[in-house]
Amino acid sequence: MKILIMSDSHGNNRAMIDAVTIESPELILHLGDCDSDCSGLINRFPDITLRSVRGNCDPWSNGPDVCDFRIGEKHFFMTHGHLHRVKSGIRAIVDSTFKRGADVLLFGHTHIPHCEIGDKLAVINPGSIGVGEKTYAVLNLSDGAIRCVIKNLS
């Protein structure tokens, strides 16, 4: 399964549409700031499932702060990251992920892309699709194996 992971779009719908068009994913995950940008993707790509969480710039959103879900045997935990203070380090969010029993941690907020696939935990931050370098992550799940690539639109 091919999953497109984006965060921190901050109103840049064009970049999000470009990433979806380039990647043709089976699932889109948006990690907040601004989750309202997702409505344009839902309208443009109605056949692709989209999940999102709200970020610190989404106070008006009714979306969840966190989302736990499974794909096959993998347990995913996604959140924006601000509630775990990820700009000060990722220890708290990693600990929270382990307490949930998740295998994959997805977060944004820092605008710094990061992809680390470990034996017990995959940690992925796609960076920011909306500002700066305009990065996103592509995660491929195949036969229980996880592969992740950070890509740049700029």
Image (tube, rainbow, N blue to C red):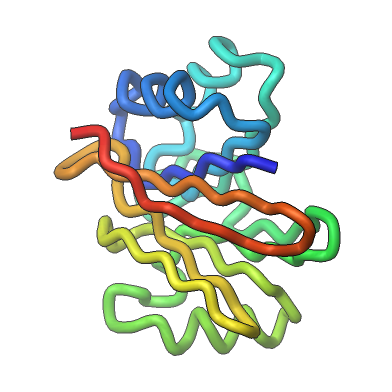
Q: Tell me the quarter of the picture where residue 12 sits.
A: top left
Number of numbered discs present? 0
Q: Tell me the quarter of the picture where residue 48 sits.
A: top right
Q: Which residue lies at the image location 34% right of the left edge and 59% below the top edge? A: 109
Residue 62: x %, y % from top left: 60, 41
Q: Say whether residue 137 is left or right of residue 74.
A: left
Pick out the residue farthest to the front.
Answer: 143
Pick the quarter of the image with the C terminus.
top left
Residue 121: x %, y % from top left: 60, 78
Does any portion of residue 84 appear in the rendered image? yes
Q: Say whether residue 3 is left or right of residue 76.
A: left
Is 150 or 68 nearer to us in this picture? 150
Pick out the residue farthest to the right.
Answer: 72
Q: Say whether residue 75 is left or right of residue 28.
A: right
Q: Tell me the quarter of the picture where residue 63 sits.
A: top right
Pick the quarter of the image with the N terminus.
top right
Q: Which residue lies at the image location 56% right of the left edge and 48% below the top edge? A: 53
Q: Is residue 116 above or below residue 133?
A: below
Is 58 or 139 nearer to us in this picture? 139
Q: Is residue 33 above or below residue 69?
A: above
Is 78 or 82 nearer to us in this picture? 78
Residue 150: x %, y % from top left: 37, 51
Q: Which residue lies at the image location 56% right of the left edge and 72% below the top edge? A: 122
Residue 22: x %, y % from top left: 43, 24
Q: Which residue lies at the image location 59% right of the left edge and 19% below the top edge? A: 42
Does any portion of residue 59 appear in the rendered image? no
